[in-house]
Each structure stands twice: as C-alpha cells, then as structure tokens.
Image (cartoon, grey):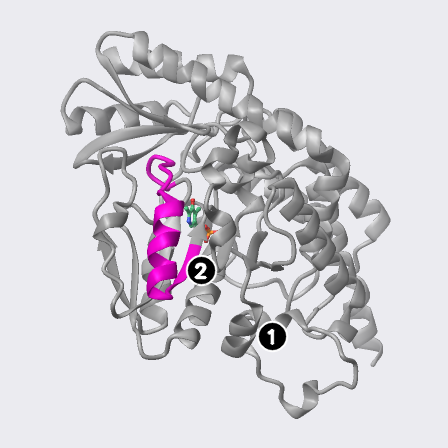
Amino acid sequence: MEADREAQEAASVDLRRDGAAALEWAASYLERVGDFPVLAQVKPGDVRARLPASAPERGEPFADVLRDLDDVLLPGVTHWQSPRFFAYFANTASDPGILAELLVATLNNVGFLWRTSPALHELEEVAMSWLGQLLALPSGWHGHIEDTASTSTIAALAAAREARPDARAVLCSEQAHSSVDKAARLLGLELRKVPTDDEFRLRPELLALDDACAVVATVGTTSSAAVDPVPAIADACERARVWLHVDAAYAGSAWACEDHRWSAEGVERADSLVVNPHKWLFTPMDCSAFWCSRPDDLRNAFSLVPEYLRVAEEVVSLSEYGPALGRRFRALKLWAVMRCYGAEGIRSRIREAVRLAGLFADWVDAEPGWELVSRSFSLVCFRREASDEENEALLNRVNETGEIFISHTRLAGRYVLRLAVGNERTTEEDVRLAWEVLQRCAVA
Ligand SMILES: *Cc1c(COP(=O)(O)O)cnc(C)c1O
C-alpha cells in the first residue's frame, strides 16, 4: 500500500505549476509557429526512433513531456497553425477554442444521456442553433456535433438507408469527397459517381434515382471548391423521394457572410447537412456540425436503449442520433469561439481569407507561364504551363523549402496545385511570400 502511494506520488503533476508551463508553451509556440518549416522535414520512422520503446516504469515530471515536445516531437510536426500553411483546407485552432478544449478535458463529460451532462446536451443544442442562425439555415432542424464530416455523412446515409430499405444506391458527383465512398462501403450501399460539367459541378440531368436511397451534393468540393447545383438536385430528390445530404464541410462556413449565401441556395430543402467548424470556423479539431430535417429517421437508424441506459426523464439523448455512445463536450469550444469572436469577428476572418485567395489568383492569372485553373471561396487551383511531371516536381521543391506548404489534386485529368487560405494568422505578406517561393522554385 505504502509503495503504491509512493508510486502515485512520483507520477504526480501539479496542475497549477505545470499547467502554467503548458500554457506558456502554447502561447510561445503560437508566437513562433511561423518560424518553423511548415511541412515536417523528417523521414518515416525518424520520430519513433527517438522515443523509448516502452513506457517508463517510474513516473516522470511533466516538464520532461514539454522538453521532449520541443526536442523530439516538434521537428516531426507539420505546422497546421502556421500562417503559411496553404495545403488541403487550412484551418485554425483559435485562442478561445484552445482554452475551451482544455476545459473540455477538465470536465471530461461523457454525454451519452441527458443526465450524464445536462449542460453538454443543452449547450450543444444552443450552440447548433446559434451556428444555424449564423449560417442562415432554416430553424427547427435537429442539430448535433459529430467528430468529423466522415462520421456525419455515415449518420446521414444510415438514416437514408433506414428510410428507404428497398433502395441501395447512393449517388454523388465524381468530385465528391472520399468519405462518401467510405460511408457507402461501411453501410453496404452501392455508390454511383455522376459526371460533372466543365466547372466540376454535378450534372443533375444525369441523376438516375430509381433504386437510390440518397444523393450527396457537395457545396465546396475538396479538389476545387466547386458548388453542385443543389436546387436542381433537390428537385430530382423530391420527385424520386430520395434523401438529399449536403456536404459543405469546408465551404458551409462561408455562409456566415451574405456574399457567399448564393451557394446555400437549395440547402434549405436538404434532409441533412454537414459543415465542419474545425475546418473554417476557428474551432480546434474535432468539431463537425450535423443537421437533419428528418430527425425521426435519424433516430430510427441509431436509437438503441439497453436496460442500463433507461431513464425516466422525457428528454432527448443525442447519442440516439448518431453512431457514438460516448460524446465529448465539443459544444463548449464551438460556443466559446462564437462568443469570443462574435458573428462579426467570424465574418471578417472569412472575408479576409477570401480576399487573400483572390489576390493570389489575380497574380497567377496575370503572370505568363502560369495558368489559373479555378478560384472558389478561399481556394485557388493553378499550375505551371508545363507537364504534369514538372508541376509535381515544382510542388516537391516548394514544400521542401519549408517556407510554405501547398498540396495538389487532379482536375480534368491534369495535375494542379492548390493554395487554400484559411488560417486566421495568414496575412497578405504570407500570401505574397507563397507566390515568390513558387516563382523562385519554378525557375530553379
Ligand atoms: C474535409 C472534407 C471532408 C472530410 O472531413 P473530415 O471531418 O476530415 O471527415 C468531407 N467532405 C468535404 C467536402 C471536405 O472538404
């Protein structure tokens, strides 16, 4: 017993003292995050090789964790918080989001029933209602938070399958995200890819819905942020009585701004919708906002109430509306971001990202030897007027500099480079530097 107590004390961490050091680490990291190579310049296995093969027998001080974070882990970190992270979809863990995440872990609520945390349930409903209003969505939809858009889409398609058990096909455009493929595979549904037009939008006249249970429309595709024609897709779905799920994981955040609401047209007719606040709404990973206008179908797909979860209260348990039982207190961080930034703070950050992407697109467009392929929201697709191989080599040279990090995709069979603005720290100077690095590497 004595030995057990000693062993526990050896491992003890002082939350105030070590917490202050951890917070200091966080603040100082964010001050210097722009100084690190954006893409980690390590080889596979490098990080693992510097770590012990087994956990220590004797507990070590938290200061050692912070030391190894600097010495061992940081060289292997790709800096998503860097203002010069332009790959995939750049995101931001904002200060209010970071602090709220600490509090989420502190409370460690597991919100599977209302009574396991009434505050978690009710704040989640309130935060989803606030977010719905910010994005001008219809009122009255069921809303809850999932970990990722992948899970939200699984939830949507499970409800669609439940609503139409005789129909097994899911249709989406050939530009839809791979999470739709994965969800269909998991649910035993057959995925059919519909061709797109020359702006990479689903062609609604090609939707054959006889044996379909769902269509997934994308607002802001992953490759080029194309916007599928949701009103025409909604017409087809209504005629065939097929579930319409809208994947706006990235671009949905832009609906906070009036200027971008055109891309929400028809979304009010969707059966379900996903928008990721962890993408472009300044909320740390993970936070995926999922709405459903047919909550009874969603509940039919997921509700299972074993004896040990039976309660007398007549209240909704959010775990009956999705795949997971245990639910994190994610609402706290979304709520903190909306409160501390306010609608105008969110709008101004989104507008700035779009403005910076526009500047970059204009520079590319004006420069001989370069081709602007597309520009949508805060994402620019472009390429050198050269072979695919040369563009790929250029991407590698650029990312090896560590000065910026961009990614690529393939559009109409061609290799293209993508620059996505989305981190709140990104300034015009950072975007200008990105353009300089690209031009320098293109001639090298
Ligand atoms: C990023 C993205 C996803 C996947 O999001 P996760 O939260 O990582 O699952 C799905 N669809 C679109 C359109 C996306 O941009």
Quick check: 283 above or below 35?
below
Which quadrant of the figure contains the N terminus? bottom right
Quick check: 311 above or below 55?
below
- Report helix, strand or loop for mark 2: helix
The residue closer to the viewer here, 9 or 214, is 214
Q: Residues within 10 Å of mark 1 (few under 14, many from 20)?
A: some
The image quadrant that residue 336 belongs to is top right
Ligand 1 lies under 8 Å from the Cβ of mark 2: yes
The part of the chain drawn in magenta is: 221-245
Which quadrant of the figure contains the C terminus? top left
Q: Residues within 10 Å of mark 2 (few under 14, many from 20)?
A: many
> Where's residue 238, x and y in %?
39, 60
Q: Which residue is mark 1?
A: 320
The residue closer to the viewer here, 227 or 390, is 227
Answer left or right for 92 relative to 187.
right
Answer left or right for 61 relative to 41.
right
